[in-house]
Image (tube, rainbow, N blue to C red):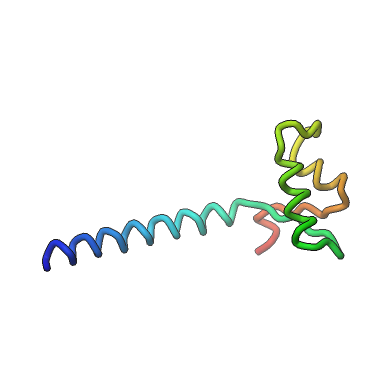
Amino acid sequence: MLIRLHAGFIRAILQTLVLSSLLASMGCAGASFKSGASPDQIARDERECRSPSEAHASYESCMRERGYVVVDGDQIR
């Protein structure tokens, strides 16, 4: 019984740490917006702009060329 509580406690702490790390990293990320774009189109454009074969200086410039407004994570708050 004591070992189960201990393992459950450790699992809860690890889950909290992972969730906290994810939330913290999301605060640093930016977002891209395009009026009228479907979720599928946004996902496809993001995937293509992140592709190493894409001949653009950066993800942001690629998304801007496709008509998106790219916002820094600090501007979203």
Q: Residue furthest left?
A: 2
Percent coordinates x, y for residue 63 in the rendering: 80, 47
**To which quarter of the image does residue 9 belong?**
bottom left
Q: Nearer the viewer, residue 70 or 2?
A: 2
- Look at 44% across and 59% down and name the residue there: 19
Q: In which quadrant will I find the N terminus?
A: bottom left
Q: How many marks?
A: 0
Task: Give percent across and percent down for residue 11.
Answer: 29, 60
Look at the picture and state if 27 lies above or below 51: below
> Which residue is at 75% across, 37% downward?
58
**Quarter-wise, where is residue 31 in the image?**
bottom right
At 42% from the left and 55% from the top, the residue drawn is: 18
- Viewer-closest of 3 and 33: 3
Question: In the picture, residue 32 is in which quadrant?
Answer: bottom right
Give the side of residue 22 with respect to residue 8, left or right: right
Q: Is residue 9 left or right of residue 71?
A: left
Residue 41, percent from left and from top: 80, 56
Looking at the image, is 46 positioned above or below residue 10?
A: above
Q: Nearer the viewer, residue 23 or 76?
A: 23
Quadrant of the image for the C terminus?
bottom right
